[in-house]
Image (cartoon, grey):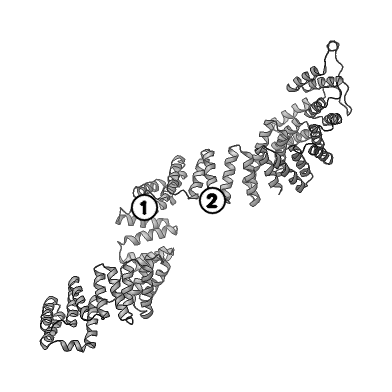
Amino acid sequence: MKIKKGLSIRKLSIFAAMILVLSSSQVQAKMTKEAHALYQQACNLESQQHYNEAIKLLYKAIELSGDDAMIYTKIAGLYADLGDWQNALAAYKKTLELRPNDAFIYVSIGNILQNLGNYQDAYKSYMQAMEIFPDYKYNYLNIANVEALMGEYKEAIADYNKFLNIYPEHQESRESLANTYLRNNQSDKACDEYNILYTKNPEGFKEFSSYGLALFKSKKYESAIEILQKALALDPDDISSHANLAISYQQLDKDDLALQEFENTFKLKPDLTALRFDYANLLADMNKDDLAIEQYKQYITTYPENPNVYANLGVVYERTNNLDLAITNYLKSLAKDNTNTDVKKKLACCYHTQKKYIDALKYYEEVLTVNKDDYDTKANKALVLHAMERYDDAIGIYKELIAKQSNVRLQANLESALTSQGDLFLNKGDYQKAAIYFNEVISYDINEAYAYYGLAKAYENLGYIPKATENYEKAIEIEPDNKLYKEDYQKFNAQNKIENEPLNKEIPSPVVASPKETSIVENEQTLIKDGDGFYNQKNYNEAIKKYLKSLEVNKENSVTCLKLGNLYKLKKDTQNAGIYYQKAISISPGYTDAWFNLGLIYAEVGNYPDCKKCFNKVISLSPNYTYAYYAMGLAYESENNKAKAIEYYEKFVSLDKDMKTKQDVINKINSLK
């Protein structure tokens, strides 16, 4: 930036001399006639630019007349014209000894010190002049100039404005003000000042490069392009204007023009490495990936600490499917700046694509600690959890996101996660929970055949034959060509044919033993042990026979009645299951497991009032029987009584120790709310 000096040293010294001549008759009187003649001869030599001869005559005049402020002022001015600053300064200081309150001498001294680069002392000299002669407003320009040179831009701007309030047409000071605004990062105000100068004198305006830079920094790219082109018309080798023009085109997506200007800039200055980052970004935007990578690498050799270059290099590698190098550069970027969540997102996505789910999850979670409501990152986190088979965690996030914003893809993922969790419980033998998840899938999509199939398998294992049959048939109805559904349904039907005589509501008569069996003395414990063996082998018919025979020995064994109820339940014979659970209760009225299982039977057939009575009984007998609260919640939910369902689910959560199960129920509570 060029800093204008305001009045030149020569002009100031002449002006000061004029003031002295006009106001100091006393000085004139002191000068002898001979000395005055020498002074006039020196002035003539000065007009002919014979400065050294003029100085010699003036020193002779001092010898004749003694110390004289006017003569020393003239000598100082002549030395200044010769560029002999030290002698000029010495002469002015001598003048100050003779005239200590001469403000204009302080101004002249300030000019010399400014030219010598001694800005602090120059400033002091200008301020001394201001103190002596505050009405000399032109001095604001001198003060502003030296403040600008010292980097005290705020103070310089204030003093330039003071000067312009008095001399609004002074172009050089307005130009200096514009330049100072630009240096002080007040580009909008710089633009205003340059615009005033350009509008008033378009033919004489020369500061196109600075004006273009101010417009560029103000992001007024269209206007910047127009002015920068004028700058280059004046000076085709103006590197700064080429560079700013290139980036202005780039910002307006005029990529071909930007590319040409970048090339023009590097032709003029090939080692302008700082610009290669923007150049590389342009090449990347134009999908010139190999060239972009080369430029990023050149930039890194000089600026290895810039985290953004590694981030952008990572983007290019990721786009070209070189995920290992993308990850390497994203990690380098984060090593320089670990706060960049955009880079963390990109890094997480790369790990996600590579199926490195633990690493992906780590960075998704870091992003969410900063931006907890980042929808896309939450969705990606759910996908990772889904892939890691943490289905319930994924389900919770899917539901949260869908509640905020309908999303077909996430809805499909939610149903998939629910199905997978249902399968997981099915394989673990937790059929009640499996049924819950498959039912939820159907609540979202009534035509999801696999959910009906999974529900059928769950009900089959729970012994709910009508429900299992209904769901097998529904699955086959939706997908009639599915061999798996048909084969399993056929097996189900074959296994559930009555192999023994029907069991009535009454407790069936014991099976009559064969002659061989009657010859063997069997006591109750032996029969129960044999029944348990068949039970474990899943030979349910033989187990039933043994348990029924044990009841002949001891009709009051409530545990055996419970076992029979469980077997009939497994055989999907809910009627006989209920009979034996009731028998167990009649023998042992406080038998909580019998009450609980009887409640499940009532729930299966849709008798919710009686099922709730059973579960309430369990709770009254054993307040810490956690699954009774869960079952009550299910019953109320089936009756669409959400408030009561939530009440019992929350009680379950407060008692149950299994964190995984608790989270499942918490998710259910949240969905109901």
- Quarter of the image with the N terminus is bottom left
Q: Quadrant of residue 179?
A: bottom left
What amino acid is found at the position of numbered circle 2 in the picture?
A: Val
Give the residue at x 72% y 39%. Answer: 436
Q: Nearer the viewer, mark 2 or mark 1?
A: 2
- Return the residue at label 1: 276
Determine the residue positioned at 72% across, 30% down.
Answer: 486
Where residue 592 appears, as percent x and y from the top left, is 79, 33
Q: Is residue 309 left or right of residue 510?
A: left
Q: For the residue labelled by badge 2, is the local secondary structure a helix, a strand or a loop?
A: helix
Q: Quadrant of residue 603?
A: top right
Q: Position of residue 24 (x, y in %)?
A: 22, 87
Say whether disc 2 or disc 1 marks the residue closer to the N-terminus. 1
Q: Which mark is residue 211?
A: none
Q: Which residue is mark 2?
A: 370
> Compared to 628, does 404 lie above or below?
below
Residue sitting at x 38%, y 66%: 182
